[in-house]
Every structure is written in C-alpha cells, then in structure tokens.
Image: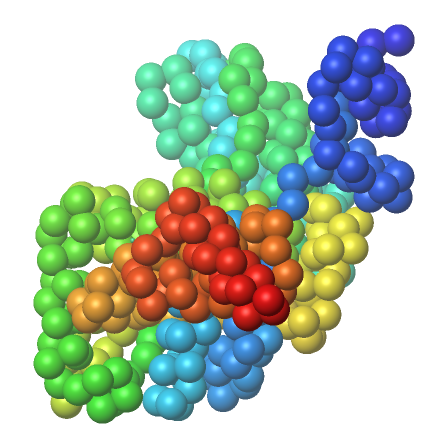
Amino acid sequence: MKFYQLSPQERRAILQDQGLKLADIDDKSLMELNQLSENVIGEIRLPLGVVQNLLVNNRSYLVPLATEEPSVVAAANHGAGIFAKNGGVKCSSDRPGIYGQIVLRVDSNFSQSVFEENFPEYITKANERFHSLILHGGGLRRINAELEADLLFIRVLVDPAEAMGANKTNAILEYLAEQMLAFPGISEKLFAILSNYPSQFARAEVKIDPETIGGQAVAQKIALLSKIAQTDVYRAVTNNKGIMNGVDAVLMATGNDYRAVEAATAVHASQTGYTSLSKWFIAHDKLIGQLSLPLAIGTVGGSIKARSDVQQSFSLLGDVSSAQLAEIIAGIGLANNLAALLAISTKGIQAGHMKLQARNIVATLNATTIEKAEVLAKMIENKNYSEHAAQTILEQIRKEAHADRN
Ligand code: MEV
C-alpha cells in the first residue's frame, strides 16, 4: 500500500520506526483530522483565547481567537474594552456573492451577442441543478463575458448564502463550462475556477472620546500614525499586519479560509497603490477609526461541522449569521489596530512583548508555581527577560529559602 492509503496510525508507526520523534495524539483526534487532509500523521496545536466583550451594533460577543503570537489576544481585548467605553463598534457588510471565472477558447463561428442571449437560460438551468443553494437563499446571480482575441473571459457571481461557497461555486462553474462548450464556436475550456477577488465586504467604524485613551495628544498621534500608514508603504504593511493578527486569529478559530482572505486583502489594499486598510482621523473632537475588509467567510460548509474545536468557537460566539461573523471580524481587526497604534505611540510595543516572553521562559522552568511567580516578578522588576536571568533568579530564591530553613 502507498503511504497515503495507510491509516494515520500506520503512517506514524513507519515514521517512528525510522527513529523520528512524534508528539502524542489520541486516536479520536487523529481520526477526526484524517478526514480533513492528506498524509495526516499528527496535529499542530494553537492556543485559543477569547475577547470577552466585543460590542458590535449594540450586541456583546465573546470572540474566539486562535493564535500563537503573544499579545494579540491582549491587544484585541484592550481595543474592544476601549470600544465598549465608546458605545461599541458599528459594523455593516455586503455579501453579494463570490466571483467565478471560466476562460474558453473560441473560433470564427463564435457570436458574442447570440451567446449572451443565452445567459438567462444558463442561470435558470444552473439554479435548477443546484437547487439546494436556492433553498438556502443563495444561487447563481450574474454572468458577464468579455472577448479578448480568441479567449472568452466569463465572470460569474455566486451567492453562497451562509457558506464561504468555494466548493459550490467551483461545481457551478464546471457545470456552466460544460453547457457552454455546446455553444457554436466555443472550442475549448481553458479553466473554470472561483476567483478570490474581493467581493464580500465588512466595514467597522468607531468614534472614540480621546479621554478614554489618554487625551487629545494621544488621539492626535494615532491620527498622524494613520496618515503615515496611508502614504508610507513600510508602515502600511506593518499596520495591516497588526489588523490581520486579529482577523486571521478569528478566521482560524472559526475554521475559515484565512489564505483566501489574506489574498483578497492584498488586492483590496493595493487598489490605488498599496496602502493602509484602516483610517484614523479626528472629527468633532472624536477619534474616528474605520476599516473595510474583504471577508469571504462562512458559518456552515467546508470543515466547520466536522471539527469539534471549531464548533466550540461557534458556541462561544452564540447564534451568528455569516454577515454578523464578518462584522465581528472587522471589529476585531480594528480593535487590534487601535491597541497596536496606542502601544507604539505611547510606551512602545516591546514592553508588553518582553513581559510575555518572560512568562514563556518562566513556564519552561523546572520549578514550583510559587517559585515561578517569584521569578517572573523579579524579571519584570529587573527588566531582564533572558533565560539566564530566570535561572539565576531561581537559584538565588532557592539559596535564600535554604538559608532561611537552616
Ligand atoms: C505585531 O504583530 C503587530 C504590530 O507591529 C502592528 C503595528 O505596528 O501596527 C504591533
């Protein structure tokens, strides 16, 4: 049998026989993961953290974030806390559908105008064929065609209802391509695949009283940093990375395709030359923050139902539609952005990071809980966050405890 045909336990045994060290995993998790991917031999774990109170359109959400990066969940909580003091974040979204592309080769018998007369029929037939999508409120909405030399570029818009819709869109595209190949003058299908071009958008806006973030001077500094991020690409990309810290963490926690969102976001940020995804400015004595993101996400479909970890995230979120989830994600992106701007415009980002690094180092010490707490406190007091410092402090604490006992 080929490696891919084996059970994950058999694959693990082969690797272990070669002397490789594999992390433990229980059979139930292994079998669950084996349904999702190929050649599965284990898992990579991520911490799941929560933002306790993200107030979106007057509803409070408990938001799950899966990330290994220290400070991201703390930053999102910090931003969300400031939003809550200012009436929360106002969000909206449009979900017209996701794009699909079919590219066909045509010959001299092809007539575009006659071909386009068939579009209503193609739409009706596809919607009959994929009837379940209609039942869920979605369906094939639009077909456009453009001819470039002997290539016909067809663009369709599929409303995937509550799903992200990649699989359904690809199935519809393949069906349509087959139908179209029967049209006179269409000689060859080059490809039929969804496009990750931005189409499903969510927007977030907050209006912040400067007193809730340390005063007018801080608000003005944030507005200035935002202005810099709009023109300086070195700052823009870092600003956007801070936004994606929160966005990707919710996407990961909810089993959504973060690669699709990242790819679409790169296009969205580059429409007029790469720039900041967010904007912060002062108007009527308030600091206004705005963010818009392309979020082709879903609350059903894909691996969502099959994964108990993802189901846990949805139970934390409560009953949410895909539009609401997209709005929550935009709100989290803006919260992370505000927290990062606050940190870098005041005490700098490193102070918080170093404390978290100290916590990570202390966690690896072979010491009691009380000793670990003492070591951490001393590292923070001395502002020395190295492994060597942690060991030295631990030895010192033990020496002192020993001396006290004798
Ligand atoms: C770090 O992961 C993200 C930040 O660099 C974002 C920013 O600078 O805005 C803090």
Q: Nearer the viewer, residue 206 or 3?
A: 3
Q: Nearer the viewer, residue 21 or 93?
A: 21
* Relative horizontal placement of residue 372, taking residue 207 as reference (left or right): right
Q: Residue at x 21, y 68 (%)?
A: 347
Q: How is the image coloured?
A: rainbow
For residue 167, which quarter of the picture? top right
Query: As displayed, is residue 276 above or below residue 33?
Result: below
Query: As displayed, is residue 299 above or below residue 141?
Result: below
Q: Nearer the viewer, residue 301 or 176?
A: 301
Q: Residue at x 16, y 45 (%)?
A: 233
The C terminus, quarter of image: bottom right
User: Is residue 211 in sight in this rendering?
Assistant: yes
- Give percent across and percent down for residue 168: 67, 43
Q: Residue at x 72, y 46 (%)?
A: 303
- Give percent across and percent down for residue 345: 18, 67
Q: Name, please, the residue furthest toward the front.
A: 406
Q: Nearer the viewer, residue 289 or 14?
A: 14
User: Is residue 279 in sight in this rendering?
Assistant: no
Q: Residue at x 30, y 61 (%)?
A: 383
- Give percent across and percent down for residue 163: 65, 54
The N terminus, quarter of image: top right
Query: As displayed, is residue 350 above or below residue 14?
Result: below
Ligand 1 image position (quadrant)? bottom left
How many marks on residues? Answer: 0
